[in-house]
Amino acid sequence: MPRRRTEIGTYGKITTTEVEPGVFEARARFRLRNGRYKRPRRRGKSRTAAETALKKAMVKLADETTGKRINAETRFGHVIDLWLAEFKKKVERGERAPKSLYDYEDSAEQIRKYMGELTCGEAEDAGLCDETLKSIRDDAAKSKRSKKSNGYAAAKRAKTVLTGVCGLAIRHGGMRVNPAKSAEAIENAGKEDVRALEPEDRQDFLTKLHAYCERKAGTSKRGGIRVQAWRDLPEVVEAMLATGGRPGEVLASEGPGVVPQRRTVLLDHHLVRIEGQGLVRQFRRKGGGTPVNPMYPSWAAPMFARRKLAAGEGPLFPTWNGQWMDPGNMQKRLREACDAIGYDWMYSRILRHTVGTHIVDAGGTNEDAADQLGNTPDVVQRNYRRKRATNPKNAAALETLFEAPETGS
C-alpha cells in the first residue's frame, strides 16, 4: 500500500542525527501549497534543541502556506515574493510597464539581501529600513552599473519597493505602520540643473548634426542599414523638438497619426525593449501617461508630411527593413554625434527640456508647457524647464521698489 501523502501545510516525521560531536541536526519533509516538498533543517546542541528550532521554522512555513498569508512572524522575504507576484499581475493586465517589473525585481533582491530573513515584526523598524536603503545606495555607488556613481537612483527605487512591500504587510496584519515611510529622505547630491538648448545654439546644433550624419551615411560600409539610420537621426531630433515627445514615443508614432491639415501628430504609444520579447510597442506613453495629440510648428510640417506619405500605415521612422527603430540605438547614435560636433553635454532628454523652456520663455505658462509635454505644471517646473538667468518682468517691477532719485533736471 503506497505511503499516504503529507497534507499541504504540514510536515512528516522529524529525523534527528548527530552530525558532529555535540551538534545535532533535525530534518523533516514539509509540503508546500504547490504540492512540492521542502526539506527544512535546523541544528542545535541537543536533539531537543534541534527539533524545537525546526518546529518553529515549520510553524512559519505553515502560516505562509495554508494559514494567514502574512502575520508578524512571517518572513519578510515571503512578503517580498507576494508583492512581486501582485505587481506581475498588474503588468499582465497592462496596468504597469514590464520594465518596471524588471527594475523592481532587481531592487527586491537588494532589499532581500539585508532584510529577507527577518520577520515582519523585526522589519517594522524605521532605523533598520533607513540603514538598508543607505547600504543599497552605497553598494550602487561602488558598482560599475551606476551611471551617476552616487547610488541615488538605486536607493530611490528600493524605497519605492520597500514602501510597497511594507504596505502589503500592513494590509494583511503583518505590520502596524509602514517603516519605509519614516526612513530618511533619499537626497541626490549630484542632481544637475535642468539644461536646455539656448536660442543661439539651436540652429547651430541642427546644422552641425545634419552635416555629421550626412558624412557618417556617406562613409558607411554597411549600405542601407547604417545609411538610413544616420540620415533619419536629424529628423527624429526635429520631431522631438516639434512635439516635446520622448524618443520612445516619437519613434512609436505611425503614419495615420499625422494629420497635416491640423498639423498634429498622435503620441499614444511608446517603444520598450522587454527581456525575452525584444522591442515592443506598448499602448500609452512612457510611465502610463495618457495619449497626447500635439500640434507641431510650421517649420516641421514638410518633414511630417513627407514622413506620413512614405510611412503609409506603418512606422513614421522605420528601420531599413520597415521595423520599429530602437530608441536605445537612436540615442547611442545621437550620443556619438553630439560628442563629435562639440555638444558633448547634450542628451536626448535636453530636447524635451528645450521645448518646455522655450514655451515658458516665449510667454507661455507651466500649464501651457504641461499641455504640450503631457505632464503636470509641477513636473514641468521641476524637471522640464531651466531656470531663467534674468527675468525682465521682475526687473521692471523692482523699478518701483524705491522712488527714482532726483536728477536735478
Image: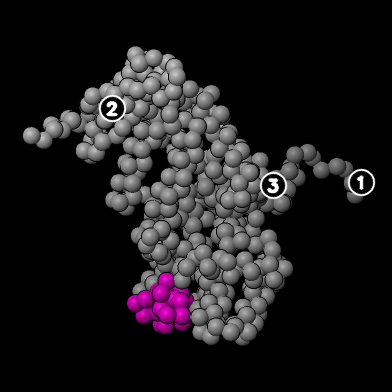
- Whether residue 80 sits left or right of residue 236 in the image: it is left
Is residue 96 toward the left or the right of residue 372 in the image?
left
Query: On the image, numbered disc 2 is attached to which residue?
Result: 28
Comparing 250 with 157, the one in front is 157
Name the residue type under label 2: Ala
Q: Which mark is residue 394?
A: 3
Residue type at the position of mark 1: Gly
Span colored in magenta: 304-324
Amino acid at dot 3: Asn
Residue 10 is drawn in which quadrant? top left
Using the rendered view, name the quadrant where residue 137 is placed: top right
Q: Disc 3 vs disc 2: which is toward the camera? A: 2
Q: CA distance from mark 3 to mark 1?
A: 28 Å
The residue sitting at 61% across, 50% down in the picture is 144
Within-10-Å neighbours for mark 1: few <14, some 14–19, many 20+: few
Asked whether residue 68 is in view, the answer is: no
> Which residue appears at 50% of the width and 32% of the height?
114
Count of all numbered marks drawn on residues in the image: 3
- Location of residue 6 by image quarter: top left
- In the rendered view, tell whether residue 290 sits above or below residue 240: above
Residue 123 visible in this rendered orientation of the protein: yes
Considering the numbered disc 3 on the image, is that residue within a helix, a strand or a loop?
helix
Q: Is residue 405 magenta-colored? A: no
Answer with mark 3 or mark 1, whichever residue precedes in sequence: 3
Image coordinates of residue 342 in percent, x first then y, are: 72, 68
> Of the residues tagged 1 and 2, which is closer to the observer?
2
